[in-house]
Amino acid sequence: MPVWGDEISPRMVLVIDDLGPNLLQGQAVLELPGPLTYAVLPFTPHAERLADLAAERGKEIILHAPMANMANLALGPGGLYPHLSEQEFKQVLNSNLDSLPQARGLNNHMGSLLTQQEQPMRWVMEVARERNLFYIDSRTTAETQAASIAREEHIPVLERKVFLDHQVTADYVEQQFLHAIELAQMEGAVVVIGHPYPVTVAYLQQGLPLLDELGIQLVSASAFLMQEAELERLDRYQQLEEQTTGSLPVLHLAPE
């Protein structure tokens, strides 16, 4: 880590999944303050309207790509399955992305089956590269290969550390949000995923201002990745400068 990395305050990336099926819940969660990232399910009844509304408000949109799961739960339109050929798979994924032109990246909706499989995830990353997108691994299974394959394919990637509302109660959401704050303070950054449940929205309306008080910076996924890329660039520059300085010959002036 470069010396100037110490100047960066702890950061939180907060992603809200599952926008699209419910208009009122989607509108409510878009009212939350700050640079949140919103994951929109393709071809759902209100996907386009909510994506347009988010863009008008300067909010970041990503595709919430439906991926096959271990429980065989229905994915709805735009589902990505392991039985698809490469052409079919990429056609579905590109169609999903075409429906949400505001998308800066994508993450997986469900996906406990697909994200374990190397070949389909390489196809995901090939499409991401072609479209200059980042990927967020929601980590719906501990066996996911998504993030490691993204790194192999040089795709900017983040990994979810905390689910806010796996249990949809105010106490649980508060517990998880405070846990996320602790992780940000200890590790320097944390990626959190929540959903547009009324209980989650109600808590975040009160909880998000706490981040400023604690010196934690709320950033969009793309802003975080740009910060990381800049830090890496500065780190390489510093290392190169140190190597160059260290390799310069020491000149000894001969006495006259």
Image (cartoon, rainbow, N blue to C red):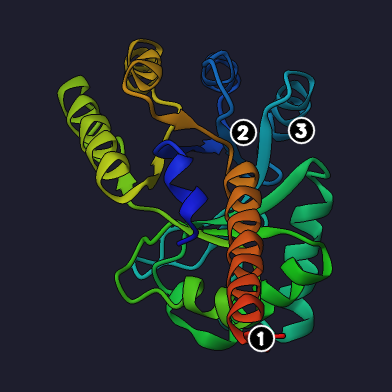
Please, what is the three-letter code of the amino acid marked with disc 3? Glu
Mark 1 and mark 2 in contact? Answer it, CB < 8 Å. no
Label 2 to label 3: alpha-carbon separation: 8 Å
Q: Along the line of sight, which residue is nearer the eye, 251 or 52?
A: 251
The residue wearing badge 2 is 20
Earlier in the chain: of badge 1 and badge 2, it is: 2
Please, what is the three-letter code of the amino acid marked with disc 2? Gly
Q: x, y percentage for residue 67?
A: 53, 64
Q: In which quarter of the image is the N terminus?
A: bottom left
Label 1 to label 3: alpha-carbon separation: 79 Å
Q: x, y percentage for residue 4?
A: 51, 49
Please, what is the three-letter code of the amino acid marked with disc 1? Pro
How many dots with numbers? Answer: 3
Say the numbered circle drawn on residue 48. 3
How many neighbours does mark 1 have within 10 angstroms: few (below 14), some (14-19), or many (20 or more)?
A: few
The residue wearing badge 1 is 255
Q: x, y percentage for residue 12?
A: 43, 38
